Image (cartoon, helix red, strand yellow):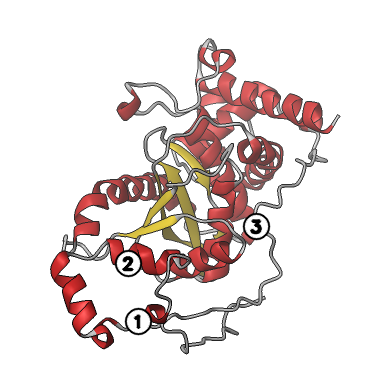
Amino acid sequence: KPLDKIKERKDFDVFKCKNNDCPYYQKKLNGMSSKEKKQLKKDPQSFKLRYIFRQFHIDYRPMSKSSPQKSKVDLSRLYVSPHTLGLILTYHVNYGLSARKTAALMKDVHGVSISHQSILNYENAAALILKPYVDYYPYELSDQFCGDETYIKVNGRWHYLFFFFDTVKKIILSYPVSPNRDTVSAIRAIDDVLMKLKEIPKDLTFVVDGNPIYLLAQHFYAQHDIHFDIKQVIGLTNEDPVSTEYRPLKQVIERLNRTFKGNYRSTHGFGSEHGSVSFVTLFVAYFNFLRPHSALEGRVPVLNPELLELPNMPARWSKLIGLAQDWIIEQTG
């Protein structure tokens, strides 16, 4: 349900709550300088604040993790070998070639005749198997997370891809695609991150841009007794202390957006929302499990010996799909 049905109540004066049982008042009081405390005693009206209460009408349960679903796609019934499928994904995802260019390359270099539509079908089939593995994998995470949105075109219209990212481990944790840049999308993006945490730390912080949807998402989670801080980096220059301190983290995810756009650009957009989700899923699988990072001294974010010992990227794609299939069977069996 949309978030535009929001009720606001402005009849609560924070400084009427002057006792030890009011943590908000005590927090503000402890953060004052001695000069401000003297002024508060002399003229308390000058420090009057208003509390805004927001009531969300959203049929959404945060952190309601469900069991991974086994894909109905049987890759063994495809007309290409696992190595050929690995080649297709390497050209199409790793190197960002369009489906038509990938089809031409398979014909001209490898002598394999395949249509561009078949390549898109194989992409969708692989993404269906990899998505539960990517979403439910037990990642080892740091405590530095940032989020941002970028544009992609779906069926001729602009959509928004929400990335949330572990800036230390270089792991993409959330990647929903939405036709709207709204609070519901921000809530879902943050929820994907929260579900991957073994426990929610007391000092959990997300670094984002100045879009107010993230503050609204923070209020939504607070009403469900899930608390975290939001640090907003605003503008292109450091005009405030928060932007000065956290801009380096924000720049990390902006580089992630540029990396994705480099792979996405050749597609010239997607014909359907399903196709966009498939491509983004494969990109995230590649980024987390297969792509070496210079910031990690050439290592991939998620180290798996079964992948590292393989000689080339097509073999690693095939093995990753096999690992995903085995993992889902183990989780659902």
The residues bearing labels 2 and 3 have C-alpha atoms spaced at a distance of 29 Å
Does any portion of residue 228 appear in the rendered image? yes
Residue 28 is tagged as: 2
Using the numbered discs, state the Cα–Cα distance from disc 3 to disc 1 in whole angstroms. Answer: 30 Å
Q: Residue at x 55, y 32 (%)?
A: 139
With 128 as the anchor, is 285 left or right in this view? left
Q: Confirm or deny contact between disc 2 and disc 3 (CB under 8 A).
A: no
Labels 2, 3: front one: 2
Give the amino acid at mark 3: Pro
Crowding around mark 3 (Cα neighbors within 10 Å: few <14, some 14 to 19, many 20+) is some
Image x and y of residue 314, in percent: 56, 23
User: In the rendered image, which quarter contains the N terminus?
Assistant: bottom right
Q: Which residue is mark 1?
A: 49
**Tag 2: amino acid:** Lys
Query: Would you place residue 191 above or below residue 213 in this image?
Result: above
Which residue does the image show at 43% across and 65% down from the upper left?
20
Evaluate whether residue 176 shows in this view: no
**Residue at (59, 36) in percent of width and height:** 198
Residue 306, x across and y down, in percent: 59, 14
User: Can you identify the residue that label 3 sits on?
Assistant: 62
**SS for dot 3:** loop
- Residue 7 in the image: above or below residue 311: below
